[in-house]
Image (cartoon, rainbow, N blue to C red):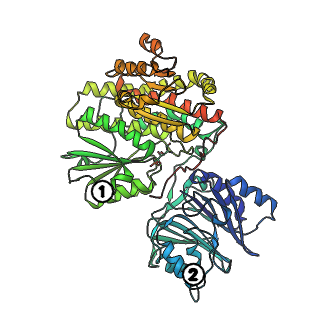
Amino acid sequence: MCGIVGYIGGRTALPFLVDGLKRLEYRGYDSAGIATVGESGLELVRAKGKLHNLKEKLNGAAHSTGTVGIGHTRWATHGKPEEHNAHPHTDASGRLAVIQNGIIENYAELRLHLKERGCLFKSETDTEVIPHLIACHLAGHSLLEAVLAAVGKLKGAFAIAVVSADFPDELIVVRQQAPLVIGFGEGENYFASDVPAIVSHTTRVLTLQDGECARLTRDEVQIHDFSGARLRRTPRSLNWNPSLVEKRGFRHFMLKEIHEQPGVIRDTLEDRIGDATGPIRLGLSSDLFADLERIYIIACGTSWHASLVGKYLIEELAGIPTEVNYASEFRYCPPPLNLRTLVIGVSQSGETGDTNAALTAAKARGVRLLGITNRPESSLGALVGELIDTRAGMEIGVAATKTFTAQLVAFYLLALHLAHLRGTRSGERIREILVGLQQLPAQIEGILDTQERYITELAREFDATRDFIFIGRGLNYPIALEGALKLKEISYIHAEGYPAGEMKHGPIALLDSEVPVVAVAVPGKVYEKTLSNAQEAKARDARLIGVAPLDEPAAVETFDQILPVPVVDEILSPILTVVPLQLLAYHIAARRGLDVDQPRNLAKSVTVE
Ligand code: M6R
């Protein structure tokens, strides 16, 4: 959830830290802070709220010249988003500083114990126990030994970084179930929660594993396990383009990422389907699917919505019973699993605490695991044996867009692969769908080219709207859920998604002329039924917006406004119907002047359970 970053080298650490925090701000923005070590000892600057508050404070102060430093951007768990709770936290001497991403579950007990030993606490955070614990173990020990002794007392999931004015030529980082990547430079080394913070400095990186820590000096990175034993690890080269983490002329990352979707879909398909006549090349072992009886998909949020479409596709095309579970529920209410069960974890970040905890619990029960993510190097990637890389790359906007459509494409490929293996669909039908998938990027380009201005105008009409309802049926029901989630998370307008046929069983009571209804209605099995459900809303004075074909008389007759989508094979429609809903949510939020990329209370990667 929080972002952590650090530098040790020959240059002043501050510019790297501030730039790194800017690139990690999507992980949390309740407060920010830095600690540097230089000739004048340890300097600490912290500020409540977004990074620009910290920058203002730094501008007003004498510049730190320290060449070792750590920085933190916070998503509050323990303690309100106030300056005294901002990281870094220090020990009593004020010479040692710690940042942490995660949760120290036994902090209350440790705090009590430390208070009894005379430690004074200045914050309500769980993290503050760490510098005090380290200080208790420093006498006669190296910084690494003291940190490891302290870590031995911690329970929870965390990534920690430590600097000390008494050890000015090193910094220590620790990883236990929270992401941490180390970057290797020339005469300088870096670490961060995620690669965007370091990719413009180096592409030589090493992902620390759970139970590992590292001692970074200017010229060396030593990796150890928690017993202190030295480990041999080799950095890898990142195939990353730093422009992925720039806005490239768009007002917000979210808008840029919506516009990246055609390219992402092309990348996801590339070299996997050839000319659509041969098997789909997902690079998965055939053992994964042998004698398969049932599939469980585990995900959260938008990835959960993609999984609902995935369930539909797998059942429809390959005939395998499939259930979708919220990761946060699966772990504590697990269904019966056997060795003929495949569990699929879906996540854009690959670092979602709920999803990874549920996958870990499933793994312990011996089932087969498959991951679907755009971050193969993530914790999820390390957890699952087999993986489909959706190739969506890094997504910065907190509201998921391109990673969602890429997950959908991955599910089409998987479902068609299973249909091919099991012979549940003819080669001709498989080819039809694959050819349709290849046409989607151009069709999305058409939607983006023609609708952006219209939707910008339409957004003006919802300045005072308090509630929205989104409806859809079949495989467009998850798209209604996704449209509602996009709108609520970035515009703070209350929005609900319902299966269109379910409205009459209760939610229809919410409707009046003040509540717009957005219906996803595309020709196919449930088209007429969805239009009828939309008419039922219209009869209650609701204003009706349809995501529907423009030239369909029934749609023109039904809807007050149409956000047009081309007519395609119904099974492919979710990838098109979601795009106008992303644009609608974006333009309503942007028009309200809200912080689209960093909506309140949220974080891009939710690493706590
Ligand atoms: O990284 P993940 O896909 O595992 O994240 C899951 C959810 O936290 C995420 O989809 C969240 O709902 C987004 N803010 C949706 O836009």
* Residue on which disc 2 sits: 115
Instruction: Check disc 2 and report its element: helix, strand or loop.
Output: helix
- Asked where in the image residue 72 lies, by quadrant, the reply is bottom right
| Place of residue 463 in the rendered image (x, y in percent of width and height, measured from the top left) | 63, 30
In the rendered view, tell whether residue 326 sits above or below residue 140: above
Q: Residues within 10 Å of mark 2 (few under 14, many from 20)?
A: some
Residue at image location 63% in from the left, 77% down from the top: 91
Q: Of circles 1 and 2, which is in front?
A: 2
- Asked where in the image residue 587 lies, by quadrant, the reply is top right
Describe residue 484's horizontal placement relative to residue 570 as left or right.
Answer: right
Q: Sequence-wise, which precedes: disc 1 or disc 2? A: 2
User: Of all residues shown, which one is farthest toward the front?
Assistant: 509
The amino acid type found where label 1 is placed reads Ala
The amino acid type found where label 2 is placed reads Lys
Residue at image location 66% in from the left, 67% down from the top: 69
* Residue on which disc 1 sits: 362
| Place of residue 166 in the rendered image (x, y in percent of width and height, measured from the top left) | 66, 81
Mark 1 to mark 2 CA distance (whole Å): 40 Å
Disc 2 C-beta below 8 A from ligand 1: no
Comparing 109 with 435, the one in front is 109
Residue at image location 40% in from the left, 43% down from the top: 304
What number is the disc on residue 324? none
- Asked where in the image residue 146 lies, by quadrant, the reply is bottom right
Quarter of the figure with the C terminus: bottom left
Q: Residues within 10 Å of mark 1 (few under 14, many from 20)?
A: many
Instruction: Check disc 1 and report its element: helix, strand or loop.
Output: helix
Comparing 152 with 594, the one in front is 594
